Image (tube, rainbow, N blue to C red):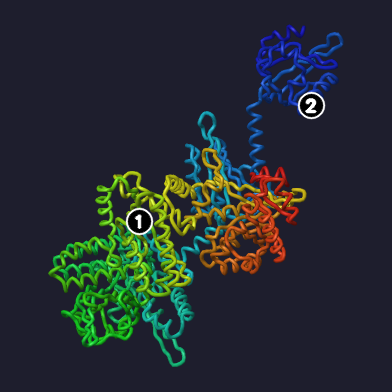
Amino acid sequence: MDYREFIQLDLPVAVAIVSCGADWRVEEANAEFTDVLGYTEKELRETRPQKMVYDEDYANLVSVLENVVRTHDNGKMQLRIVRPDGKTRWVEMRCSVLAHYDVKPYVVLFLWDIDEEKRREEHQKLLNQKYELMEQLSLEYPFDLDVENWTMLRSYRLMELRGQYDYSEQYFPVDEEVLTLCPPDQELFLKAMKEAATEEKTGSMDTRFNIHTENETPKYLWFRTYYKSIADHNGRITRIIGRSFNIDEDKNLQEEVRRDPLTKLLNKLEIQRETDAFLEGAEDGTHVLFLIDIDNFKGVNDNFGHTFGDTVIVDVANIIKSFFRNNDLTGRVGGDEFLVLMKNTTLEKAKERAGNLGEALCKVYTGGSIHYRISASIGLAACNGGDGNTYSSLFEKADHAMYRTKQGGKNGYEIAGAKDVGMIRNGIKNIERRENMGAEDREFLAFSISLMAHAKNIDGSLNMLLNRITERYQLDLVMVFEDNTENDGMVMTNYFGNNFSFYGKSAFPKKSPSLKELQPGEYMIVKNSRSNFATGMGKYLKSTDTYNEKAPFSAVVGKFEYVGGCTGEVIYVSLDEERQWQPGELEIFQELTRMMAIFVSLRYRVAESREQISSIQKKDPLTGLYNQEAFREAVVEILAHSKPDEVYAIEYMDINNFGYINENYGYKVGDSVLKMFAQDIFMQEYFRAGCRLYSDFFLLLIADESQEKMIDRLHNRNKRFSNMQNHRYPNSGMGISAGVYILEDNKMDIEFAIENANLAWKNAKNTGKRDITLYNPSLRIQRTEEQKIVGEFYEALYRDDFQMYLQPKFILRDRSVYGAEALARWKRPDGKILPPGMFIDSLEKIGYITELDFYIYEEVLKTLEKWDKQHRRKIVISTNFSGRHFESDGEEFLNRIQHVLSKYSVRPEYIEIEVTEGVLVKNVAVLEKCMNRLHEIGFRVAIDDFGTGYSSLSVLADMPADVIKIDKSFINKGMTEQKKNLLYEIGRMVKILHKDIIIEGVETEEQEQFLKEGGFTCGQGYLCNCPVPIGDFEKMYL
């Protein structure tokens, strides 16, 4: 048959006739063949064969054809053809000799399109290589589940955890693999996978994997798996892929956090959570909550010491734990208080258990001549599953029962009844830390002023105020006294207390010497029951159920002055002797004491009180300036009648280092400074209205004929105040920080104007400017951007949006790279890369910068470990740490540095810790301690941006730093001969200290040349390269 006739046959495959001479060519081809190759018949004849076949496959094709011609055997191979558009396509070819014409062999080729199948194979191969690489270069384990076959990848690294090192990765049935998980986690895993196999999902789950073989006792490690469903072009889920990593250490740390560090029982928060979780899911059965309080435990600490006391607490905890089952919940909820939830029991069994436990906890401790006995008071509260009880409701009932045990002589137990509701103990410790005076406290002061202003009955209003004070600040008693100058005594005129009731106005015949010495505006803290101000109080009480003269307490006593130079005291009492009075509480008590002085004064001036109240309502009692509400009203009124030829502005300001005066000279001196400052403001021509916001913060409405003249006068005021105060109080460093907003329209919203002045003031504070900052619109834009940055930070950190770039450090002589600095870049979801200048300052202000620092630090460790496994050249990488890490004692920073390092097999000498010079000025002692510890671990330490933080070379000499990085400002701004000489001298002195030196910001050959002339050898800057991604750095320098 002629080959042309053969090609005309209606064959359902791609067929072509190829002549094989010195070269081979396509003689004839059917339509299927041309469709596969993408060429027309004419193009097939005119195109050289090499162009139609992928380079790597062409030699094999020639070899197959030659073998077919020589042996007349059938040939077969898979190859990639190259279509006219340059795209490749996989085909399977089979061929045989058809005939010889003119001695030239003609071969028939059959092609089958296998492109889709082959690409799937390649994709899987690539995926396997990727998984293998991932396992080799990271601590992650690949996760891959084939939905169609319901099989999943068994990672060889997971098998290595079992001691199986010759294992190759394979796919096994899911139902078989799930058996390697802890039984409680198996259902969770299967449920998550079945959901992800039916609809596209992204999720994560924590499960425990057995690292022991089938014949061994199971040992489980926690793994976290992030997974995602992958759909084909038809929307059908074909795979579930992701990554797993070992979180066993983190889980153990989380478990430690849940536990009381001394007893290892659940802490208060965790036992509350677990109790609520159990009760919410419990459907039936009886459950009993035990509240156990150790009687007389304070005496153990007082007589034997706290170390022995801790031993007793641990002993008590172990006894309690031994009396209950493993699935019962046991926790420590206070210093000497314990709680147990006994699940699925009966009340009779619980009563028996309580009796036996009480006997076991009754012990006598002996030391020298001291014999001290402890016991336990126990309250029981029972409930049935599904009846809606919570931890709080059961605790409340058990608290009542335990309190009755205490009242009945201790050492026993009581069962809560239906009437046991409501809080019972005044001694419950309020351990919440109060912040310094904030918005709520200022609102409370405003309420106090309003109460006074509208008082029809002075004593009634004052008593109401005392009531509110006890409620708001968790006090047991507040008393107002007026001093009796004739007999050196004091008379209680007003009081409010929980469970206290006095007979009339109680006169106390004698004051303590410390109370006599106390001056108006000052306060003192009194502890224990033996202060003279309490002596004799009992005889005036109608009921002494709560109080006795030997009862412990803690109190704040504030002194005030009222009409005619008379004095009095307000005493704020807590029956919790251990109460820690916070600075914010003391500050608000001072303000309230001043307020109550006005109430007392009004009692003596009832006839003219209304007029005074109206004035007082609008005024700050210390400075005479308006309060906030009156200030706003005054500003609106003034601006409504403003003069067209005047410029008006709102000024927001505070006194720098004012706390130094209160701490070193006392609150009375601090008050005098505030009064004097207010008087100075009153006297100025530009002053229109003002208010004292709180403490040393002020708000003013000012006006002048021009903006320039106004700002000039404000500068003079600030300078005058600063000079005067620093002369009176050396080393105080007092000055004014102010933000000024020039009103564009005298009818504009006053709140908007105050907010703008506040933004300007914050800018002054943040930039360290101790004077005046004018508002400009960029501050509001900046605040919006900062809020956006801060709001998105943690989500971006979780998504790994932050990327580490490396900037090379190089030798000036030949520009060879010897190290690098790690820098952060933020890749937004839209692909935009944010440079550090757009987010570092915002994160620095709020403190989030510490998390970013450790994120980059860990990226450095991962990179160094990867390079080590790839046998790349070793270089030192420096990474930055903000001064925020050193604001406390530095211990948390050091512990975290070591903890993160322990996760990687990286030697610390290849890491350089950079801190900015500014930290030297603020926290010298802490930084020196941290540097010494970092050296002990093996890190190198560098001082960054030297020359910008005003530190002295003497401080630098004491710092155990290895490297000093000279700030770029020395070389990038108008290099004069004088600046060159200064830089050379700094370099000489740093070398004397035996520290390495790097010049930052080297960008030109001219800079490089004069640095070399000055003896500098190392630089960093764009002359060598800008910061680049890790992959680019590896290609260029490793």
Amino acid on which the number 2 mark rests in the picture:
Asn
Q: Which residue is depicted at the point 42% across and 90% down? A: 370
Amino acid on which the number 1 mark rests in the picture:
Glu
Residue where numbered disc 2 is placed? 60
Residue 170, above or below 911: above
Regarding residue 176, the answer to whether it shows in the image is: no
Which is nearer the N-term, disc 2 or disc 1? 2
For the N terminus, the quadrant is: top right
Position of 364 compared to 399: left or right? right
Q: Which residue is depicted at the point 41% across and 67% down? A: 658
Count the numbered circles shown.
2
Q: Residues within 10 Å of mark 1 (few under 14, many from 20)?
A: some
Q: What x and y, as percent, mark residue 349?
A: 35, 70
Position of 52 compared to 403: left or right? right
Q: What x and y, as percent, mark residue 125?
A: 66, 37
Extreme-left residue of the structure:
607
Q: Which residue is depicted at the point 41% across and 50% down? A: 708
Q: Mark number for residue 766?
A: none
Which residue is at the front of the view, 43 or 471?
471
Which residue is at the front of the view, 757 or 350?
757
Q: Are marks 2 and 1 in contact (CB under 8 Å)?
A: no
SS of the residue under disc 1: helix
Q: Residue 325: which quarter of the image?
A: bottom left
Which residue is at the front of the view, 770 or 749?
770
Q: Mark number for residue 280?
A: 1
Position of 200 compared to 511: left or right? right
Which residue is at the front of the view, 732 or 723?
723
Q: What x and y, as percent, mark residue 23?
A: 83, 17
